[in-house]
Image: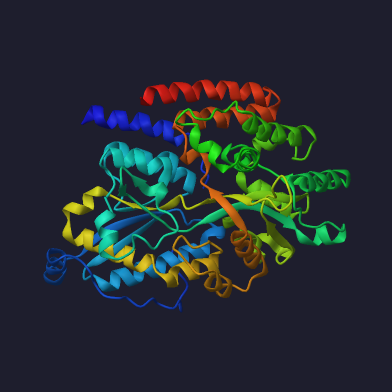
Amino acid sequence: MMKKSLALLLLLMVASMLLAGCANSEEGTKPMVSRGLKGTGKELAVAQTNHEPFEITVRHIQVGESKKFRLALLEDVVRTTEAAIPGLKIKLDGVDGEVNRKERLRGEMATGKPPEVFDVMGSPDAALYAKEGLMLDLTSILDEMDLTDKFTTMVPFTHGGKIYGIPIGGSIEGYFYNKEYFAAKGLEVPKTLAELDDIAAKIKADGKYPFAQSSKDAWIPLMTTNNLWSYYGGPQITYGLKTGETKWTDEPIVQGFAKHQEWVEKGYFKKGELGFEYTDMRNQIITGEAIMMMDGSWANSVFRDPEQAGGMVGKIGFFNMPPLHEGDPIVVMQDANNGYGFSSAVADDPRKLLAVKEFIKNMWTEEMQLRGLQEDGVLPAMKMDLAQMQTASDDPLMQEIIKATSEIGTSFPAFDALVQAEVNIALSTGLQQVISGELDAAKMLENVQAIQEEANAAAQ
């Protein structure tokens, strides 16, 4: 057991270096309507005859002002679940997302004692935990609840043909931009990458930074690079890296990194970006210091909140990174990699297993997905008609994000879901070296390709 725990800890230390990327509610909150208990005969029998108090813990990352709406949704689910199961008390344990992923959950998994319910990244984290038998296999549970085919994708949480987690929401990556500035300067949303380049040059000449950026955590600038190389080489190019069919040194990938390096050298990002935290780049666009910002669609909640965005509420828009040539398909990173996992230990406790099933039933509903879109600006993880999404929120920014989603020709998962952990680490460190001027993009990618080949060989 000690050797197994140590091996898992070492794996998680590698995984922890991967770069993500991503209280009581107020009185009067409208309660959800429970749909009743559903479980095996054994589970129901135990729940009906045993009313002794018992507790499960839900580890979540809905902490801070920007997560207040998502926390309110979670609290509604908790209340409804507790009301449905006699004796149940759910303890909410809120932890910062990076702390949960890199420290708290990693340590708990190493000792084999994670919370009953916990926030988790599907790839690669859930795969590591599932491999060690620490995550509950949800395959039959989701079938029982008729939920298996209700999601846009379950790929990040599917390992060895079994499902080990459920995505809480979806997202796309694109550019938030200052609409007021664009209008004042006669700028239009670009239709090609060349037009985006031209806009950036004009903004720079006007004394502003074209792009807000924070690169202390490499997953943030890699959003830009990942989308660039997927345009130059097509979104399928990343899938071949793990099999050896494609290489990091292939010309289209080099072009993507070279374009990013060019933007750095032209001063399109604020100097010192390697020391900036994630929230810093949002402040750059809110204060007007920068005009555009590549980020996940989840960031919209910041720009719709007067307490965070101030006078910029209603003045921020959203567009997809444009293609190389006008009329080409829009290629966008679209993902559902963050969600909840469940401890495999609950399978040995009928009451806790029933509580987990009730939590799932109450959390993943059309109502909650639409509330998440309306109140928190999180795109649904469950399949949803476009018209439903459009009517769920009349906020102008959300309408632009929904429109951008409908324009996608081809989507792809973030690259870190497609390559080994050690490759992600090498690429993350390498991009930061390119940003600092320490390495040229082409040379950096040669180094990454060497790590890729070692990882591929080790897997054979």
Total count of labels: 0
Vertical comparison of 446 with 406: above or below: above
Left or right of 396 on screen, residue 84: left
Q: Quadrant of residue 368?
A: bottom left
Closer-to-camera residue (238/439) = 238
Left or right of 94 on screen, residue 395: right
Left or right of 429 on screen, residue 37: left
Vertical comparison of 220 with 54: above or below: above
Q: Quadrant of residue 46?
A: bottom left
Quadrant for the C terminus, please: top left
Closer-to-camera residue (358/322) = 322
**Which residue shows up at 43% across the image and 25% down it?**
455
Q: Give the image location of residue 215, x and y in percent.
A: 63, 38
Q: Give the image location of residue 353, x and y in percent.
A: 22, 59
Vertical comparison of 400 with 57: above or below: below
Vertical comparison of 182 with 13: above or below: below
**Which residue shows up at 49% across the image and 34% down it?**
240
Quadrant for the N terminus, please: top left
Left or right of 307 on screen, residue 166: left
**Which residue shows up at 27% across the image and 38% down it?**
132
What sort of colour scheme is used for the picture?
rainbow
User: Extreme front residue here?
Assistant: 327
Q: Give the image location of residue 302, x and y in percent.
A: 62, 59
Q: Give the image location of residue 309, x and y in percent.
A: 68, 60
Whether residue 120 is visible, yes or no, is: no
Whether residue 368 is visible, yes or no, is: yes
**Which residue shows up at 16% across the image and 68% down it?**
44
